[in-house]
Amino acid sequence: MQRITKGASEDLRPSWSPDGTKIAYCVLQNVAGGGGETGSGGYIFMPDDIFIMDSNGNNKMRVLKGWCPSWLPDSQHIGYMASSSSPCGINTADIEGLDIKTYPAYMGGLRFPVGNFPTLEISPDGKSVAFDYNWKTSRCDICVMSLEIGGVRNLTRNLKGGCYCPTWSPDSTKIAFTMETGEKLNANSMKIEKETAIYTMDADGSNPTLLIENGAYPAWQR
């Protein structure tokens, strides 16, 4: 194991380019107050910058502001969640932070509020984007939007538990994801925790299948 980022920033959500030569990732900043993920000391972590670096950690370059970068098949463009003072939307841009294309923040009735930054992944064929959406009911579902014709479909609305962290199979025909399956008491912390399992489904949401019990955060091998 090799550490390739270091410093005071919070670096996360790494994404490999399809050609294996670069990694895009997020850098978070600490701010006092507001929405986002609460850190230690009462600070709030908010998405700030997207960086791209060589696979060995060299040549780090800030390209734009946003969250959860995911590569398009050409290894020259990324998709990402734009973060701003207005409702967030899904964008694509080249690795210089230019050629930005924006997809509507209101998509099939969905609206990304500031402070809600989902996992986002472009399909390997570059035609669709999958993301998890946290409803006001606190249930999380996996949705897919076509980058060619628009339109959003909720693929997991009929499943028992909340679903998140979608990841595409290399041939773009399936999605693996984490599903909440129950609750348990942590004997050490005496807190109720979610039990999760890894499922797969077809790209249209059909044939949900249990793959691994007591697992989470899947990633496909090529």
Image (cartoon, rainbow, N blue to C red):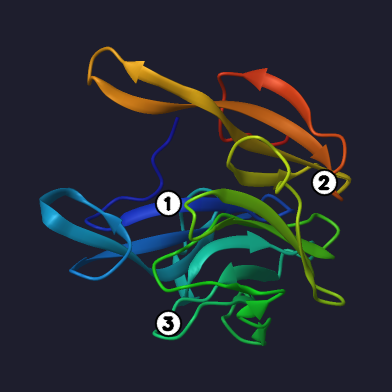
Q: Is residue 152 left or right of residue 179?
A: right
Nearer to us: label 2 or label 3: 2
Label 2 with label 3: CB-CB less than 8 Å: no
Categorize mark 1 by other alpha carbons within 10 Å: few (<14), some (14-19), many (20+): some
Q: Residue at x 87, y 77 (%)?
A: 149
C-alpha separation, residue under disc 2 versus residue under disc 1: 28 Å
Relative depth, front residue between 43 and 192: 192
C-alpha separation, residue under disc 3 versus residue under disc 1: 19 Å
Q: Residue at x 82, y 46 (%)?
A: 205
Q: Is residue 222 visible?
A: no
Residue 118 at x, y percent in the picture: 53, 58
Q: Secondary structure at mark 3?
A: loop
Residue 12, label in figure? 1
C-alpha separation, residue under disc 2 versus residue under disc 3: 31 Å
Residue 148 at x, y percent in the picture: 86, 75
Q: For the C terminus, give its image quadrant.
A: top right
Residue 84, label in figure? 3
Relative depth, front residue between 69 and 37: 37
Task: Place residue 102 in its image quadrant.
Answer: bottom right
Task: Place residue 153 in its image quadrant.
Answer: bottom right
Residue marked by disc 2? 205
Task: Place residue 119 in its image quadrant.
Answer: bottom right
Relative depth, front residue between 158 and 132: 158
Residue 81, label in figure? none
Earlier residue among tags 2 and 3:
3
Q: Report the amino acid beneath label 1.
A: Leu
